[in-house]
Amino acid sequence: MALIEFDNYSFSYLNSTKKSLENINLNINFGDFVLLCGPSGCGKTTLLTNLKKELMPSGVGEGHIKYNGCEISKLEDSISACEIGYLFQNPDSQIVTDTVIQEIAFPLENIGLPTEEIRNRISEIVAFFGINDLLHKKVHELSGGQKQLINLCSLLVLRPKVLLLDEPMSQLDPIASYEFLSIIRRLNEEFSITIIMSEHKSDRIFPFIDYAVFLKDGKIVFNNNSREICKEVINDEIFANYLPTVTKIYNELSNKYGKYTNTPLSIRQGRQYLDTIHDNLMKINENMEKNNSFTEANVSGNTKKFNSTKKTIKDILPFSNNKDTLISMNDIYFAYEKKNLVLKNIDFKLNKGDFVSLIGGNGAGKSTFLQVLAGILKPIKGKVKYSKNLKIAYVHQNPMIHFSKDTIKEEFLESILNSNYYHQEEFNKDIYNSLLKLEGENFIESDILNKLKFKNINYSFKDLINFFDISHLIDNHPYDCSGGEQQKIIMLKTLVQNTDVLILDEPTKGLDPISNKNMANILNTLISQGITIIMTSHDLDFVAENCKRCIMLFDKDIQIDDTPKLIFKENNFYTTFVNRMVKDYIPQAVTLDDVKTLWGLE
Amino acid sequence: MELTRIHPLVYLIYYFIMIVFAFIIRDPYFLLSFLILILVLISLQGISSELKNIMKLFLPLSILIIILNPLLNKQGVHKIYLFKNFFITYEAFAFGVLMSLALLIVILIFSSYNRSVTYQDMLYIFSKRLPVISMVIVMALRFVPLINSRTIEIQKLNKLKSNGVEINLENSNDDNNLEEFDSNISNIESSSNSKFLAKLNSSKKFHKIREESKVIGKIMAVTVSWSLEESMFTAKSMKARGYNAYNRTSYLSYDYSLADIFFLLLIIFTVSIVTAGFMQGYGIINIYPSFDFSFSDLPLNIYYFAFIIFLLPLIYLEIKERLLWH
């Protein structure tokens, strides 16, 4: 008998005619590792919360969900609380108490265990995870990854049989994600805990899941084991993006060179496949070298372009000032506390039309770099120079904190009011109020707004809204939008204020593959319109595919300043998945498109 | 103290009695010995920078008490003429000195208490009687640093004007226009109000204050709404982990040890003697209307010694711990 059974289950939220889940039929066995995928708002979270009695959203459910043969809503409190654990996205907001030991003890205190039993269970979990050092620390001293680990511990002390994980790694950096994932895998392998997890980045998860469930508009579109589902979704417009990079390359190659016994899911399996068609690939390579040695020449030419970040004599001379330089940082030192430098001896020039990405390990000072650049933090030594009439926009990692109004249209109006439109237009409080009364389409179509001209963008207001694809949100509260949508709204807000430089802190955090593509599209369009963008990112694939210039921070300084292709070509470990897989054959290929063109797979 | 564990309830009783004593005792000898022993205890427990800061605040305050009390209070028999018709009384002066001494002692007792009993121990004492309140305290302790860090992030954004966009970094011209524009708006706003407000609005200083308070208000509003939004998840996570389904227990456990019993017995023994002394007037000296005290009258009686012994056990334990470490 399956541990969890969905029997033709449908669910719609209160006051909503739309069904958020529709005719779900799904059986999950004891010890399964299930991955839930789908674009934002497809019902992943709704499905997960419906499995937990305490979190069941208010609404109407039809059909049945059974846990161990018993209807979820009729489960005993103790069983639901103990056996089904639920981990939320944001590590910060789930923590209730202020020290680690208290947080781990919290659920045990809740279910009324005697003190001795509580202490036994804590000591057990502490020994298993090796978190002795953290035990008496204050929660706010921990890193995001450590917080999520503590949250997990706090669920595990209850000895759950099922763990429901709602994008648990979306707020973590890659290293912390690796660690978290390896723990989840261990729990599944060694303790046979059933795991149902929703996640966007499948590269690391696919190799060891039992099956994947792909949801779209509340319906299960695909549901199969990991290898079969790869074959099924090859031609699906949306879900092909959710496959691991290795599988995507395999799919391209297998059309030309024939299939492998198993669909490769990990880099290791991918390399094994490449070995089987080794001769074919070498032939292409030889041809390529004969035909055009110009790619190499091109590459070596590029290397000189940004390679030296330190000043040359030419830079120091006053007359060689580049007019296109918007922001220049000279000999910047920064520290939050005494004798603990975060940035050291930074020299950096941001030129007009640049699309720069900052990469580097966790705590390398990427966010600090951006905040110094934006003028939010004052450097201890050195000066940041801005060109005249420059407008800078900074978008925080957590876009939520930019909002202060009740609706999104009010946010836009405020931005327009704040920008200097009063030069050209009569945009006063009365117009503001009259616009505020308009709703939805009427607001977007209103003449006053569409007459506005923006300095850096050739679009009208209506076109901008449609281009960013946020017309359906215009009357909503900002907090009701997803993270990606919030990012887009803030960016639009800065655009109507005629910003020249857009400084983005982790715009790709927690985005699903489709939103990721949209974001890339938006940023590239803005670049083509003449806006300068600098951003941080942990998503190396995004950087490789889109950015023109890439800066790696290391040891408080700029280590490399070059095009992303060259950086990832040279790197062995800190590089894209594509590059890791095809490195031995074509080291210069860092994106899927590179592989396609170089191997002629169009 | 790490090598001896004393039950938090015993600590609570002990420190409570100390504070009561500090308020009752008015005998200079008793108070001075009290102060010296507390100072010894604190220095053994380690002086923190926090204490130093409190002392920086307290010392001017105590001087103020010593000066102000005789100036405002003319009770007492012994008059000391400073000028022709202006006098202070010896009693009022003595009362001021003893008052500030007692206050100093109370402050020192509190900071010593903080070092002996952590807030977790306190929670343990209260969690059985008042489980809800102790839970609220724990959550507040989590919330304060959280809201602090959130405010810092929001403040950062406000250094750039208007939601993260800096308007015209190096162009004063436009800035002026902006102000003009702002005042236009505020004029429109206040046209329905009284003329006085309009006048105030036009004055630059008021305008600046108004702007600043607007910014602070906005920061607070964003902080609060962000925190409220996040706390919905906190509530969900509490519920998901079985909060409110059963009677809560505590992971903290303290057993009474032999040391606790000895400590308690010592407290009961000495306190009863000292209280008997109070009944007979030892340790409590009437200051008003007449303060008759000479330093040659050494309080060599059993009540004084009992009082000293009452103050010694923690000092003894601290010294013993030092010796054990070496």
Image: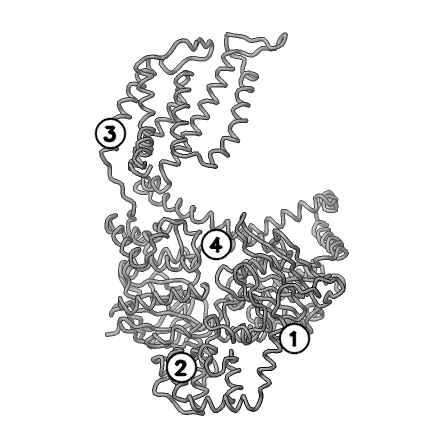
Q: Measured from the top left, where is residue A384 in percent x and y?
A: 66, 57
Q: Image check: A185 left or right of A256?
A: left
> Alpha carbon of mark 3 to alpha carbon of mark 1: how far?
82 Å
Is B143 or A571 nearer to us in this picture?
Answer: A571
**Point 67% across, 68% down: residue:** A351
Residue A601 can be seen in this image:
no
Marks 1 and 2, how far apart at CA: 36 Å
Mark with earlier residue (4, 3): 4
* Residue placed most toward the observer, A432 or A563: A563
Whole-Å distance between the Cαs marked 2 and 3? 73 Å
Residue B40 drawn above or below residue B301: below
Rendered image: mark on residue B262? 3
Identity, as a three-letter code, of the amino acid under mark 2: Gly
Q: Are marks 2 and 3 in contact (CB under 8 Å)?
A: no
Disc sitting over residue A528 in the figure: 1
Badge count: 4
- Which mark is nearer the camera, 2 or 4? 2
- Disc 1 and disc 4 in contact, CB within 8 angstroms: no
